[in-house]
Image (cartoon, helix red, strand yellow):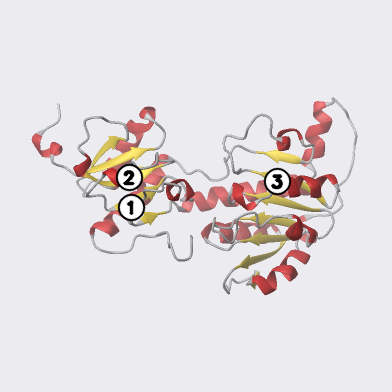
Amino acid sequence: MTSPASALAPVLLIKSGGAAALAEWRASFDEFAPGLGLEVRAWDDPEVDPARVQFVLVWQPEAGRLAQFPNLKAILSAAAGVDHILADPHLPELPIVRMVTPETQQRMAEFTLMSSLMLLKDMPRIIAQQARAEWREFSTPRTARETRVGVLGLGALGLSAARIHAAVGFETAGWARSPRSEEGLACFAGAEALPAFLARTDLLICLLPETADTRHIIDAGLLSQLPKGAALINVGRGSHVCLPDLLAALDSAHLSAAVLDVFEEEPLPAGAAVWRHPRVLVTPHAAATPSRRERARQAAVAMAAVLNGLPPPHLYDRARGY
């Protein structure tokens, strides 16, 4: 039975992981946010008074729902991206916080490095040979030290990916819209530097934010500027890649392979051509999802900042689009 004191407590509403995850969310917030006085409730709990909801932690909230909470102070994304929140045409003008944690950065760094090494060792060919029970020995043309990696987007996740590649020995560079400086990393900035960045990139890793300017940025024009035989790893947003152009570049052998973790339509439809392309590795948006405990830790920091009148970390900037 709910006590009178807890009945008056402000509510943190959760839409991530479903009912099965609620106990874990509650235990994690008990650990990291005991002083905030929030009651953690499920998104679809019919007994929650909308006026008590001060924070929401959400993934793909249905359109119009967020506008129903008159005392909402901030919207916390359950993931690094916020496009699933911005899709709501009735979205209230409130702070939106991206879920970027140290664990997210580590997981993304590990995933991109794994993908680069798989492409370096021609794992698509190995997988295809195993499917045919075909033993055919081959060698790959170069090592990491002879391979130029280019990270498109140098935010927190992009920098983590670039650093781990440089540590392994890849010749690593990064590109961002505005100038950056990072020890041991060649940094390119702005549209005028993009062609030079692409021309020196054998493995292109996309970790751009989703903005109007980045939609279908990886198209035939961009891919043609990569050296013949280059490969692509997209772990940014599905909207970054024009899939017909990518498939054409693979079929012409201008591009050697691709690892795709994100797609414009998810789950990826069974009829999508990339499922069956011999030079594409498809992963189910699995690159960098942090644990619920880690997300609760980060959400607690963000909520405490908001309640104290301070800007929370990883606040979405509507003007910049990320």
Q: Which residue is mark 2?
A: 66
Tell me the distance, in whole angstroms, between the alpha carbons under discs 1 and 2.
7 Å
Work out whether 97 lies above or below 17: below
Determine the secondary structure under disc 3.
helix
Q: Residues within 10 Å of mark 2 (few under 14, many from 20)?
A: many
Quarter occupied by residue 129: top right
Q: Which residue is mark 3?
A: 243
Q: In the image, 44: left or right of 139?
A: left
Disc nearer the start of the sequence (1/3) = 1
Work out whether 53 lies above or below 309: above
Q: Which mark is residue 72?
A: none
Q: In the image, 232: left or right of 79?
A: right
| Kind of residue at disc 1 | Pro
Contact, mark 1 vs mark 2 (Cβ under 8 Å): yes
Tell me the distance, in whole angstroms, between the alpha carbons under discs 2 and 3.
33 Å
| Kind of residue at disc 2 | Leu
Q: Residues within 10 Å of mark 3 (few under 14, many from 20)?
A: many
Disc nearer the start of the sequence (1/2) = 2
Q: Which residue is mark 1?
A: 92
Quadrant in the picture for the N terminus: top left
Between 71 and 173, the one lying in front of the other is: 71
The percent position of residue 33, horizontal first and vertical second, equals: 27, 47
Determine the secondary structure under disc 1.
loop
The percent position of residue 184, horizontal first and vertical second, equals: 64, 70
Q: Residues within 10 Å of mark 1 (few under 14, many from 20)?
A: some
Q: In the image, 256: left or right of 281?
A: right
Work out whether 195 lies above or below 65: below
Work out whether 232 lies above or below 27: below
